[in-house]
Image: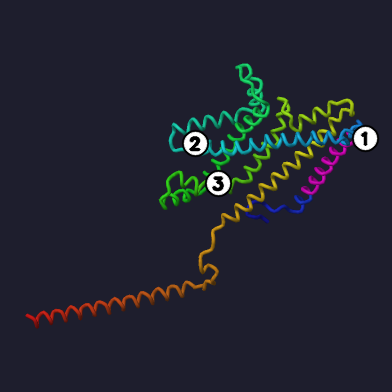
Amino acid sequence: MTSVLYDVPGPRAIARNRLLGALTILLVAAAVGLLLWRLIDTGQFTAQKWSAFTFTNVWAQIGLATLSTLSAFALAGIGALVLGFVLAIGRMSEHAWVRWPFTAIVEVLRAVPVLIFMFLLYYGLPVLGVRMDPYWAVVIALVAYNGSVLAEVIRAGVESLPRGQQEAGYAIGLRKAGVMRLVLLPQAIRAMMPVIIAQLVVTLKDTALGFIITYPELLFYAKYLGSQSSVGSPIVPATIVVGIIYIGLCLALSAIATTVEKRLRRSGKVGRVAGANQPVQEVTDTELIVTQRGLGRYGTSSGIGLAVGGAGDGGGGGDGGGGNG
């Protein structure tokens, strides 16, 4: 038996798939169990390791580190979206002298890793006599990289639309800027929203790279707390707590973005025209042919009647002319 896309598995294939699934579950469970056993064996779940989290000051510092992470992400996310739109529009320009420089900028920014950007901004600029705060080094690096990636995402969304959308915009008198702003970009953003959300989540997680240049975000404080021997050097517990916070932030961002996506889809629906809810009577092909023939006969009779009437009027006019003559 086959379906449209693939062959339906038979009894042997079903048994084999179930066996492979069970083995995969067992291997994953064994790996998780081994990890938990090593954590317990090394004393990572002892009270001493977790005693640091009983202090109010530790949670206050974690809160400040979370705010630092969110502040860097907020500005970097907005900047990446703005830069992505600018680069995408330049990338799709019909003028080669505009398109090629933007293409080169996008490719260069995408090729350079975020960490290299941060190193160049924080450690490279002081060589030239320019000192940059770690916050701005993190934000600029994230904007440059993620903005170039979002530019390609937006461009792919626009180019995936049917060409008729653009032609319809020109047909109603819109210029290229109007077609891009009113017709293409809204549809492209709605279509590529999941990819944009995923890239923003990547931006949020990449803020953790700021700890390498001493930016006081979550991972930086987790490393600092883990190096304190007075509380048992809880590097693993601190990493677990920070990881849970990152997971919560990413889930919250995904939930917000999903809500926005649903509202965009709801607002993008075309309203129904008047009378659209009225039932439509089905007409068979035979009835349609009979109706067309009837209309043709009636139209011919009407045409003959008009012609006769016209001839009679003409004859009357002639007689009248003769009488006058």
Give SS at disc 2: helix
| Mark 1, residue position | 47
Left or right placement of residue 275 versus residue 291 in this view:
right
Vertical side of 286 occupied by 229: above or below: above
Which residues make up the magenta segment?
Answer: 16-39
Q: Quadrant of residue 321?
A: bottom left
Q: Nearer the viewer, residue 190 or 311?
A: 190
Residue 188 numbered tag: 3
Q: Amino acid at mark 1?
A: Ala
Q: Count residues near mark 1 (Cα–Cα under 10 Å), then give few for <14, some for 14-19, many for 20+.
A: few
Left or right placement of residue 46 versus residue 226 in this view:
right
Q: Nearer the viewer, residue 151 or 48?
A: 48
Q: Is residue 185 visible?
A: yes
User: Quick one: which residue is furthest to the left in this view?
Assistant: 325
User: Where is residue 245 shown, x and y percent of the image?
Assistant: 77, 39
Left or right placement of residue 295 versus residue 204 in this view:
left
Residue 90 numbered tag: 2
